[in-house]
Image (spheres, rainbow, N blue to C red):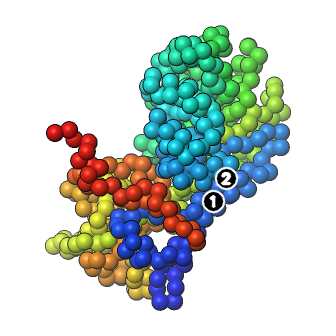
Amino acid sequence: PDTTTISADGQVSIAGKTLSELADSYGTPLYIFDRATLINACVAYKQAFATYYKASTVRFLYASKAYLSPHLARLLSGQGFGLDVVSGGEMLVAQRADFPLEHISFHGNNKSEAELELALKLGIGRIIVDNWSELERLIRIARKSQSRPSVLLRVAPDIDTDTHKYLQTGHASAKFGFPLQSGEAKAAILRILQDGQLQLVGLHAHSGTLLRETRPYEECLERLLGLAGELYQEKGWWPEEISPGGGWGINTVEARQMPEVALLAQALQRKVEALYPQLPAPMPSLVLEPGRSIIARAGVALYRIGASKDTPGGIHYLFVDGGMADNIRPALYGSQYTAIAPEHIYEVADQTYCISGRYCESGDMLIEQVKLPVLREGDLVCLPTSGAYCLPMASNYNLVPRPAVILIDDEQICVMERRETYEDILKRYPI
Ligand code: LLP
């Protein structure tokens, strides 16, 4: 995080609190989020796009799936960000934070009838229609409740991305959205316009996540505006807003590196300038949905070593008190993290360790190889850049309670999620 400091006697602090004192007060595993880093990331987006194409506007929706809590929702609302949610659960957390629900977009490829009804009841700002079943379901529900929700059509733009297979979402056979090439996206728009129950305000596509190049965004804009151009010609319909989704990557190993949002802003600016002269109507508003690039660097995971083992094959395991149930990303995507030993920061990092968790599975590995000073039972290990997609994918594997989560700044510490208890777990099981 941006507020990290190391004192002369080797104490590592975030927002003025040492990691040792936080571990002692809140226990481990502990996820710590730094308010200043979060705000800086929001400001970086706003600044990068401040000079974006004058004839249009830009709105930012934070992708809640990267991590959400009521405290975080309030912080983001204070920064002028909306939210992208994908479930009734995420909607209700936003509502709990008194988040302005009209600034929320509801995504997902299998929204239930109950979730769509909840979205209409709460007055969620936009529903992103993903497929034919959902389109008909939403038309039916809207007609029944005599409402006319604002929707965007999710398009599968057939764009390849250079990212992990599980993180690609815009290719032709992706599970999300109406395929562009087959003409289905256009057919769905015609259906919405002809029916009239839904108000079609724009087009959406999301090509993938952990992207390091701007090409997918540029291609996406071009394709969505191309489709809009056809619709304008044939039906006189033109989008008010257009969204190439989120997905801007960050580096989880070189944690100090800021995400270069300026690169994305410049590329989109250039693309819009090139496309604008050919557009039949004003440039629609641009809506971006960053998740990881807002939250990843703000969060760190803090674990305590409970045991260690040296194998005959020369692997030096450090077993920490968390692992794959609070961070499945290394096991699922081969994601790489780095680690620091906050109580031994000035010691020479000449040992190669494998940081493994406490779960009953050999795949429970956080870092396969990392150089650290000599560490023992009782020492702390901290994984920076753990703010995105760790906690939201956490499980109760082995029925271990989930970690506590705090948000800190110079003045206060808020518990964003209290540590789960055995009682929380046991009450799920009727006897
Ligand atoms: N918008 C849409 C429609 C999305 O599907 C996503 C991510 C985002 C925005 C935000 O993308 P971001 O800026 O956070 O990259 N569990 C995976 C990530 C899956 C993300 C899926 N959709 C991981 O741990 O890397």
Residue sitting at 34 percent across and 67 percent down? 28
Image coordinates of residue 174 in percent, x first then y, are 47, 31
Image coordinates of residue 55 in percent, x first then y, are 83, 39
Image coordinates of residue 56 in percent, x first then y, are 79, 39
Figure quadrant of residue 355: bottom left
Figure quadrant of residue 113: top left
Badge 2 or badge 1: first in the primary sequence: 1
Q: Residues within 10 Å of mark 2 (few under 14, many from 20)?
A: some
Say which residue label 2 marks.
79
Say which residue label 1 marks.
39
Secondary structure at badge 2 equals: loop
Image coordinates of residue 322 in percent, x first then y, are 31, 62
Residue sitting at 50 percent across and 75 percent down? 17
How far apart marks 2 and 1 lie (CA) works out to: 7 Å
Residue sitting at 56 percent across and 26 percent down? 120
Residue sitting at 68 percent across and 58 percent down? 44
Q: Are marks 2 and 1 in contact (CB under 8 Å)?
A: yes
Q: Which one is nearer the viewer's eye here, 97 or 111?
A: 97
